[in-house]
C-alpha cells in the first residue's frame, strides 16, 4: 500500500521540473502512477467484495482507502493539466507519444470515477441500514434509490468487474425486499382485516364477520396532519413504486367484502366505532328490512360512511402530486358504480310512466353522492357515470320496459295453446283511456287541425257489429299477448320521442317474434292435433284483425315521427293471415292423407260378395265416417262457421271423390 507522502513527493517532482519535460521521464512516471492506481483499485474492490459478497466487515479500511483514492484523484487532475499544457507546447514533436500517455491517464481517471461510485454506494447502504433501524422509512427508501443509482452508473462503464457488480445487485435486491417487507408489515398493523371464511358460498350472513380495524395512533381530526408513521410508510412505498400495488390489493378486499355486500344486500348495515387504544373499527351489522332491493339513498348513505371513515383515518395523505384517496378511487370506482347501477338504480327505475316524475328525488340523491366523492377526491371532476345513468331515466325506463315486455311475450308464446277463450261479436279488448288528440298535450296543433276538418256524416250508418271478428275460440295466451301490446303502447303515450319510439317498435317486435317462434315451437303439435291447428288459425286471424286498427288507435297520441303515419301495423296483416291459412291447410293435408290411406284398404270395392272384401270395404268407410265425425266435433266450437263448413266440405269432398273414382274404375273393368 502506498502512503500520501510518497504520492505527494512524486507529484512535486513532476511539477517542479521547468522547461521541457523529457518523454521518457514522463512515461516512466505515468507508468508508476498507473501501477499505484491499479493497486488502489484492487484494494478497494477487494474491500467491497469482502463487504457485500463475502459479508466481512471492514469499515475502517474502506474509509482509509476512500481517502487515498480521493488524494490520488486530485493529484491526477493536477498532473493531467500539466501534461495537457506540455503537450500543446510540443504538439509538433510528440503527438503520438503524448496521446498514448493521455489515454492511459484517462483510463486511470475512469478507474477513480468507478471508485467514487463504489464509495457512494457504500455510504448510501450504511445510511439505509441506519434509517431502517430507526423506522425512518422515507430516508431509507431514498438512500436505497441512491445506492441503486450508483450501481447503475457502475454498470454503464465498460470493463466493469462483473463479480463485483453481481454482488452489488444482489445486495440491492435483498435490501429492497427487506424494506418492502417492513413497509408491508407496518401497513398490516395499521389496516387489520377480519374476513369471512374463504370456503363455502358467499351468502349475506357470512359477510357479518367482516371487520376492518384502523390502528393509526389515534383519530385524525379535520385539519390535523396525518399520523407520521402512516405518511412515512405511504411515501416510502411511493418511492419504491409499490404504493399502487398495495392500494390495489386493499381495494380488492374493500370491494369484495365491504362495499359490494353493502350495495347488494339490503339487510346489511355498516357500523363505525372508535375503540380506545385500538383505533377505528368498521364492521357489518344485520338489520331487518322488508325491501327486496335497497333504495339509492340507503346505498349512498352506507357507502359514504365507509369511504368517509377511510378518508379521515387512512387515505387523506398526499404522495407526490396525488392523494391516496385518488388512487383508491381510480381502482374501485368503475366496479363500484357498475354494482350500484345493477343492484340499485336499475331496480329503482319506474315500472310505468306515471312514476317517472317521482324519480327526480333519485337524480338529486345521485348528484349529492357524486359531489361528496369528488370532495374527498375519490372521484375525478369529469366523472359523472352514475348521474348520467340516473338522468337518462326515460331511456332506461323504456329499455327495462321493453326487456320485460319481450320476456313476458315469449313466455306467453311458449305456453300451452289448448286453454281457450271464446270470441263473440260483443267481445272487446280493454283499450286504455287516451287523451283527446286536440287537447294539446301531445300534438295540440295537429289535433286542432283534425277537429277543424269537416265531418262526412251519412244518413245510413253501418251496424255496430260490422267488421267484427266471427265467433270462434282463440288461445287465452294470445288474448293476453294482445292486452300486453295495448298496455305497452299506452306507456308510449305522453312519453318522450325516443322512449315512445322504442316502446312502439317493441310492440312490433312482439308480433314479429310470434310469427317466428310459435310455428316453430309448436310445429309437431300443430300437425298432430286438429284442435291446436284450428286454434292457431284463429290466433293468427285474431292478431291480424286487431293489427288493422291498432296503429290508428294510438298514432294521434304519439310524438313525431310516429304521429305522421309511422305508427302502423297494417304491413304485418298479410303475413299473419297467410301464416294462419298455411298452418290450417297443412293440417287439412294431413287429414286428407289419413283419409285416403284408410280408403286404400277397401280393396277397390271389388268382389263385395266376398265376405273378406266386404268386411275390408265396410271397415274403411266406417273409419272415414268416424274421422269426419271426430273432426266435426273438435272444430265445430272452435272455427268460425264459414271456415268450419269449408274445411269439412273439403274433407267430405275428398272422401266422396275417392269413392266415386274407385266405383268408376270397377264399372270400366266390368264394361271391358
Image (cartoon, grey):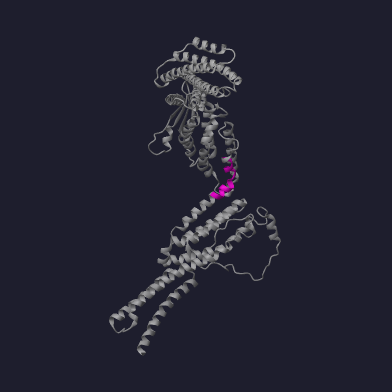
The location of residue 52, given as percent across then percent down, is: 42, 21
Between 297 and 238, the one nearer to me in the picture: 238
Q: Is residue 216 above or below residue 645?
A: above
Position of residue 600 in the picture relative to residue 306 (left or right): left
The location of residue 166, given as percent across then percent down, is: 43, 26
Between 366 and 27, the one nearer to me in the picture: 27
Check if residue 648 falls in the magenta segment: no
Work out whether residue 227 can be spotted.
Answer: no
Residue at 31%, 81% in the rendered image: 614
Between 195 and 71, the one nearer to me in the picture: 71
The location of residue 136, given as percent across then percent down, is: 49, 20
Quadrant where the C terminus lies? bottom left
**Overall secondary structure of the magenta stretch?**
helix
Q: Is residue 122 above or below residue 206?
A: above
The location of residue 259, given as percent across then percent down, is: 49, 35
- Dividing the picture into quadrants, the one containing residue 209 is top left
Highlighted range, magenta: 386-399
Work out whether residue 394 can be spotted.
Answer: yes
- Dividing the picture into quadrants, the one containing residue 319 is top right
- Dividing the picture into quadrants, the one containing residue 627 is bottom left
Residue farthest toward the bottom in the current orientation of the protein = 671
Residue farthest toward the front in the current orientation of the protein = 93
Quadrant where the N terminus lies? top left
Between 318 and 256, the one nearer to me in the picture: 318
Q: Is residue 141 above or below residue 289?
A: above
Residue farthest toward the left in the current orientation of the protein = 611
Residue at 61%, 69% in the rendered image: 462
Amino acid at each position: 500500500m502506498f502512503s500520501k507522502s510518497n504520492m505527494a513527493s512524486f507529484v512535486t517532482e513532476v511539477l517542479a521540473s521547468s522547461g521541457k519535460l523529457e518523454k521518457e521521464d514522463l512515461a516512466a512516471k505515468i507508468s508508476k502512477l498507473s501501477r499505484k492506481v491499479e493497486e488502489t483499485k484492487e484494494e478497494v474492490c477487494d474491500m467491497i467484495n469482502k463487504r457485500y459478497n463475502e459479508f466481512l466487515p471492514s469499515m475502517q479500511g474502506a474509509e482509509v482507502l476512500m481517502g487515498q483514492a480521493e488524494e490520488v484523484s486530485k493529484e491526477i487532475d493536477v498532473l493531467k493539466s500539466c501534461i495537457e499544457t506540455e503537450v500543446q507546447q510540443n504538439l509538433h514533436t510528440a503527438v503520438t507519444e503524448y496521446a498514448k500517455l493521455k489515454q492511459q491517464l484517462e483510463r486511470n481517471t475512469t478507474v477513480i470515477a468507478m471508485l467514487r461510485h463504489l464509495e457512494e454506494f457504500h455510504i448510501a447502504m450504511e445510511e439505509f441500514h441506519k434509517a431502517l433501524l430507526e423506522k425512518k422509512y422515507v430516508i431509507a427508501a431514498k438512500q436505497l434509490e441512491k445506492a441503486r443509482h450508483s450501481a447503475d452508473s457502475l454498470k454503464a462503464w465498460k470493463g466493469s468487474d462483473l463479480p463485483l457488480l453481481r454482488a452489488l445487485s444482489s445486495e440491492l435486491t435483498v435490501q429492497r425486499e427487506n424494506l418492502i417487507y417492513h413497509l408491508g408489515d407496518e401497513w398490516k398493523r395499521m389496516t387489520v382485516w377480519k374476513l369471512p371464511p374463504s370456503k363455502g358460498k358467499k351468502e349475506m350472513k357470512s359477510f357479518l364477520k367482516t371487520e376492518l380495524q384502523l390502528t393509526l395512533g389515534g383519530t385524525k381530526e379535520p385539519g390535523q396532519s396525518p399520523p407520521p408513521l402512516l405518511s412515512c410508510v405511504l411515501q416510502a412505498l411511493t418511492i419504491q413504486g409499490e404504493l399502487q400495488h398495495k392500494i390495489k390489493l386493499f381495494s380488492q378486499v374493500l370491494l369484495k367484502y365491504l362495499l359490494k355486500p353493502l350495495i347488494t344486500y339490503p339487510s346489511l348495515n355498516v357500523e363505525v366505532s372508535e375503540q380506545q387504544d385500538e383505533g377505528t373499527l368498521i364492521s357489518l351489522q344485520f338489520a331487518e328490512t322488508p325491501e327486496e332491493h335497497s333504495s339509492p339513498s340507503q346505498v349512498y348513505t352506507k357507502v359514504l360512511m365507509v369511504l368517509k371513515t377511510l378518508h379521515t383515518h387512512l387515505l387523506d395523505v398526499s404522495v407526490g402530486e396525488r392523494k391516496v384517496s385518488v388512487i383508491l378511487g381510480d381502482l374501485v370506482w368503475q366496479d363500484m358504480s357498475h354494482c350500484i347501477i345493477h343492484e340499485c338504480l336499475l331496480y329503482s327505475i319506474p315500472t310505468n310512466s306515471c312514476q317517472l316524475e317521482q324519480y327526480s328525488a333519485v337524480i338529486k340523491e345521485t348528484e349529492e353522492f357524486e359531489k361528496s366523492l369528488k370532495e374527498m377526491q375519490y372521484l375525478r371532476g369529469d366523472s359523472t357515470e352514475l348521474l348520467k345513468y340516473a338522468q337518462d331515466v326515460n331511456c332506461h325506463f323504456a329499455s327495462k320496459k321493453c326487456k320485460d315486455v319481450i320476456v313476458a311475450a315469449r313466455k306467453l308464446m311458449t305456453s300451452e295453446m289448448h286453454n281457450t277463450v271464446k270470441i263473440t261479436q260483443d267481445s272487446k279488448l280493454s283499450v286504455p283511456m287516451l287523451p283527446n288528440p286536440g287537447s294539446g298535450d301531445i300534438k295540440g296543433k295537429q289535433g286542432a287541425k283534425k277537429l277543424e276538418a269537416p265531418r262526412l256524416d251519412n244518413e245510413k250508418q253501418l251496424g255496430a257489429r260490422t267488421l267484427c271478428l266471427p265467433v270462434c275460440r282463440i288461445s287465452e295466451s294470445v288474448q293476453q299477448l294482445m292486452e300486453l301490446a295495448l298496455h305497452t303502447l299506452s306507456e308510449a303515450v305522453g312519453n318522450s320521442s325516443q322512449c315512445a319510439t322504442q316502446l312502439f317498435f317493441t310492440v312490433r317486435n312482439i308480433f314479429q317474434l310470434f310469427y317466428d317462434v310459435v310455428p316453430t315451437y309448436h310445429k309437431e303439435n300443430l300437425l298432430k292435433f286438429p284442435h291446436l291447428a284450428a286454434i292457431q288459425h284463429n290466433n293468427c286471424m285474431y292478431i291480424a284483425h286487431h293489427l288493422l286498427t291498432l296503429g290508428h288507435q294510438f298514432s294521434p297520441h304519439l310524438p313525431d315521427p310516429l304521429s305522421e303515419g309511422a305508427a302502423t301495423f297494417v304491413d304485418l296483416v298479410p303475413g299473419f293471415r297467410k301464416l294462419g291459412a298455411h298452418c290450417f291447410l297443412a293440417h287439412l293435408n294431413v287429414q286428407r292423407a289419413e283419409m285416403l290411406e284408410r280408403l286404400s284398404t277397401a280393396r277397390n270395392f271389388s268382389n263385395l260378395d266376398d265376405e273378406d272384401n266386404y268386411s275390408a270395404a265396410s271397415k274403411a268407410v266406417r273409419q272415414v265416417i268416424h274421422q269426419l265425425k271426430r273432426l266435426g266435433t273438435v272444430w265445430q266450437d272452435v272455427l268460425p262457421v264459414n271456415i268450419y263448413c269449408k274445411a269439412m266440405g273439403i274433407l267430405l269432398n275428398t272422401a266422396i271423390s275417392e269413392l266415386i273414382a274407385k266405383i268408376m274404375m270397377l264399372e270400366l273393368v266390368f264394361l271391358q
